[in-house]
Amino acid sequence: MHRRHFLKTLPVIASGAAMSGALDPFTAQAATPHGIAATVHPLATKVALDTLKKGGNAIDATIAAGLMLGVVDGFNSGIGGGCFMVIRRANGEVMVIDGREMAPAAATRDMYLKDGKAMPEWSQTGALAAGVPGEVAAFDLAQKNYGKLKLADVLLPAAEIAEKGFRLPIEYADRLGRVQKELALFPASKEIFLKANGSALRLGELLKQEDLAKTYRAIAKEGSDWFYRGEFAQRTGDWMKANGGLMTKEDFANYKAVLREPLRTKYRDHEIIGMPPPSSGGVHVAQILNILEHFDLAQFGSESVETYHLIIEAMKLAFADRAWWLGDPDFVSVPRGLVSKAYAQELAVRINRKQAGKVEKHGTPPNATTDIFRKHTTHYTVADAEGNWVACTATINTTFGSKVVVPGTGVVLNNEMDDFSIQPGVPNSFGLLGNEANAVAAGKRPLSSMSPTIVLKDGKPVFSAGAAGGPTIISQVLLAVIRHVDFGMPPLRLLQQANVHHQWSPDEVKIEAKAGEHILGPLKQRGHNLKQMSSFGACQAIAQTPAGEFHGAGDPRVNGKADTF
Ligand code: GLY
């Protein structure tokens, strides 16, 4: 049974100059002369804006929000996990930071097999499930190079909330309730999240995380070395050794956040900046947009059967390629041809405009073995931050990750090892299939769907989106871009439209019932196997008008919050 999973995401934040104070008729978001933040939690949105107010730039504010989310939304993301950041600076420079988790040095291809049979419970819960966390390294790298404040400035507001506690909102209480049995397996997790009688904290009850507060303060005082070369690495290594894990103190010392070459493509008259591998997000958002460029979606209309049909067919083709070609580019050859316009044309002609097609297998992009994504490490000079945009998606993978809290630290470790293909043909917790390209290996980063995206027009940022929800992230971000570029929708309105997702395998279309019978009925007649959902996904989006006004929205599905000042 495929469980419901959620990724934490994403502060999408912009700061810069805007002109007037008009209200957008759809979003009711105030235009702002200073900045905007959109996250899934009001405290994270607030700390981002407070950071801008005290002189930080969008990079500082994003990091402050991410660290706060690790406290108030820690079932989704935190410093025990990883993140990707897409940054477009005021001076026009664009860079992406890969803070994805890394497999320990002792990890091996078949570590999740027992007598030849896959053991998903090992890659999902407990000591073997976690990769070396990357969020602290990514934040440190981003802030040292492009921020104005210090890590201590953005850690302390979150430490204060961790120490004082906060009252559990419905989403937190709900998720906690669902995993209380697994959390109870680990004493430090049990002590923080469960009551003495073993039941989970409930809606409105106070959650204090004193150990996490101490951890944040220790990093604030001693820097990221405390995490990667000091006490945190030591404690984690010790716990792993005693509990059957592979991760060592040395694995932490060997971890590095990586500056990679941004994935830049054109869609109609816009430029799309996304995350390259080991995210599959940037590649497949771009690939699907390239395919859809061959169809005049604007003419069909946003809420038309034709538009839904074409999007679903393009998704199928792209996700078949994902399962075959995608993996960590430092270990396997990922063809750049996947995002070529010529390949998209080849795929577009395979789409039957009236009937759901069968996609048997992946395609073969041009120069598949010779033109590949590589690691590119670059340095940029620090400059003033006015007008910076940051899209950041972060995660510990499924709810409360591995369920392990490293004793004495309050840090929940991720279960990102499950994003590897633990055995060809065996679906991961999101039902995704993978192949050799995404097999486990020492020091390798598992494939991700996280798709932080910034859209430019005439060289200026006009839109940004990112989402939570495993592979549906790719679909949500794709829909957000299409609904903005092709249909001119502002953030809140585009997030109010129905989500739709097809990941090639299983051959089914997840679609929100609110699409309406006038869409669902004809899609069924065209041969689509629909799985109607009441709701899925959590996307944040912001936009800036030609007059400079910011508009943003947190996803109404999860009570996300956007705000300006
Ligand atoms: N952990 C899910 C993803 O990165 O896609």
Image: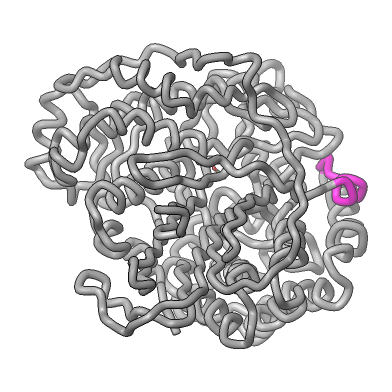
User: Which quarter of the image is occupied by the C terminus?
Assistant: bottom left
Queried whether the magenta region covers residue 251, the answer comes back as: yes
Q: How many marks?
A: 0
Q: Is residue 3 left or right of residue 397?
A: left
367 shown above or below 480: above
Q: Quadrant of ligand 1?
A: top right
x 59%, y 78%: residue:
207
> Residue 221 location, x and y as percent?
86, 78
User: Which quarter of the image is occupied by the N terminus?
Assistant: top left
Q: Is residue 139 left or right of residue 398?
A: right
Q: Residue 418, located in which quarter of the rendered image?
A: top right
394 shown above or below 342: below
Q: Does residue 119 show up?
A: no
> Residue 465 location, x and y as percent?
43, 55
Q: Is residue 214 left or right of residue 48?
A: right
x 79%, y 78%: residue:
217
x 18%, y 51%: residue:
514
Please report the bounds of the magenta region as a residue range. 244-254
